Image (tube, rainbow, N blue to C red):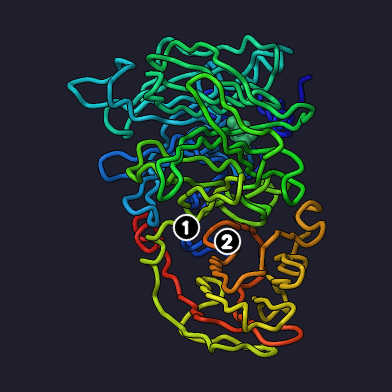
Amino acid sequence: MTKTHPFILTVTLLLAACTETPKPGAEALASAKPSYDEPHRPQFHFTPAEAWMNDPNGLYYLDGVYHMSYQYYPDSTVWGPMHWGHATSTDLVHWQEQPIAIYPDSLGYIFSGSAVVDTRNTSGFGRDSVPPVVAVFTQHDPLALEAGRTDFQNQSLAYSPDQGRSWQKYAGNPVLRNDTGIQDFRDPKVIWHGESNQWVMALAVYDRVRFYGSPNLKDWAYLSEFGIPGDTRLWECPDLFPLRMPGSRELKWVLLVSIQKDGPTGGTGTSYFVGDFDGTTFRANPAAQQWLDYGADNYAFVTFDHAQVGWGQRLGIGWMSNWQYAQQVPTHPWRSAMTLPRMLELGQNGDTYFLKALPVPAVSSLWSSETTLPAEIDDGLEVTGAFSPSQCELALDMDLEQTTAEIFGCTLSNEAGEHLVIAFHRLENKVVVDRSNSGPRGFSDEFYKGPHTAPLDFSRAGLDLRIFFDRASAELFADGGRLNLTEIFFPQSPYTRMRLWTRGGKWVLQDGKVYGLDSIWQGEAAAR
Ligand code: FRU
């Protein structure tokens, strides 16, 4: 019944390290200051200045500031005793790294979890009518794991009286002990459920999500569980939230679940269900599991608490990597980036509800140049302009009635002959991303096992497409955000050429633009 997460192997090597000053990990950090301009350093995605990062944690908005914590190991560029790093932003585009928010302690490492703005002060942690922010996270105890116990993951609290600048652990930790006999018991995501007047926690428990309810964030009672009968893949980082159908009063509930194995490209991936929640039970057709992103590199995607976006939208962000190779990718002195923050909305096709996700509009504030493409692309077009192909947005509004090409695509390449190919197969209704020759890939056998394919319906009059290239990543959004596809790659030198090409006819655009994008790091680099 139990199953061991790959990092549990690593954990056993890092035993006794759960103090505020963990032992150095396996890979030393650079001695020089990070320049934010190292090879493969994303220019408009969040990365920590240095060291290892994975899942986004404790996301919330308060008084004009977005707060993002994340799984962080400050002493190495590989996974180790987890802390919560912390970054803030006022526009979701420019991020300032802050001091570490939460350190491991004698109860264990600080694994993934969430944070809520407790506006009613149900927890009693607030003082002088300032609402406390309460973080709810898993404490993973490596010593209990080593001792062969099954209850080494339990849920704890920390609270901040000053909007997230400083954190205090709750003296009564852990607040939810693992009494299930199942090892994997983690990643609490909490929301306020007004109808039942309680906090509701979604918790990943091996191959399912368990829901718990609480009046005060300290006392938790089991409510129900949700899983797929017969499916024993490991689930992580759940997130339950309501969404209204745009233009209607219909309210649905979305359950995001990250899956450790057999994601859309074989490794880890973020999936979701759309259903109903009555304060106790989540009901969805378990067969109706869908992928939030068809690429290899969007994991542990979770959403912000208290973001002022209305009932029809939900703001979230994902970890832009894959556990299959995340610890081997050739970046230094940091490892991993977050995806662009994305706004989720519901869509409907007959009886099927689905999510659409688009980058937050503020990304356009980075536009530094605009290059207009011709209305027709026949054979091939080398796109040149005041932008760098490795740091730009390609935005296309396609005329599919006039388009006759069977296949059309975009290739980025460099002087070394390395290239990333994104091809649209109109007759087969699919997109194919090929990173086989995108750069050296000897760092991991798992990185390339074949091209990645996603469904995309071309049998309509028009189709919108946006692709964001940021040195070592491409994020593709098509069909109003219905298709997301996120991929990372590591060319020896930046891609300097962008070529649009066709096979078997012409590719017709209603509108086509390439926008150069500014770096978000000038201020950060200067401040260090
Ligand atoms: C997901 C995850 C979580 C866990 C964290 C540990 O990537 O495995 O389940 O809390 O990472 O860093």
Choose top left, top right, bottom left or bottom right for residue 478.
bottom right
Q: Is 199 located above or below residue 84 in the figure?
A: above
Quarter of the image where ligand 1 sits: top right
Give, as a three-letter code, the residue at label 2. Answer: Glu
Mark 1 and mark 2: Cα distance apart in space: 9 Å
Q: Mark 1 packing: few (<14 Cα in 10 Å), some, or many (20+)? A: many
Q: Is label 1 within 8 A of ligand 1 (CB to nearest ligand atom)?
A: no
Q: Specify whether 140 is left or right of 47.
A: right
Mark carried by residue 475:
2
Residue under label 1: 359
Q: Nearer the viewer, residue 48 or 65?
A: 65
| Residue nearest the observer in this picture, 346 or 83 | 346
Q: Position of residue 322 (x, y in %)?
A: 67, 47
Quadrant for the C terminus in the image = bottom left
Element marked by disc 1: strand
Q: Is mark 2 within 8 Å of ligand 1?
A: no
Residue type, mark 1 in image: Pro
Query: Does any portion of residue 83 appear in the rendered image?
Result: yes
Query: In the rendered image, is residue 85 in sight?
Result: no
Q: Residue at x 62, y 20 (%)?
A: 225
Please say if 510 is above or below 168: below
Q: Residue at x 40, y 26 (%)?
A: 192
Judged from the image, the secondary structure of the residue bearing numbered disc 2 is strand
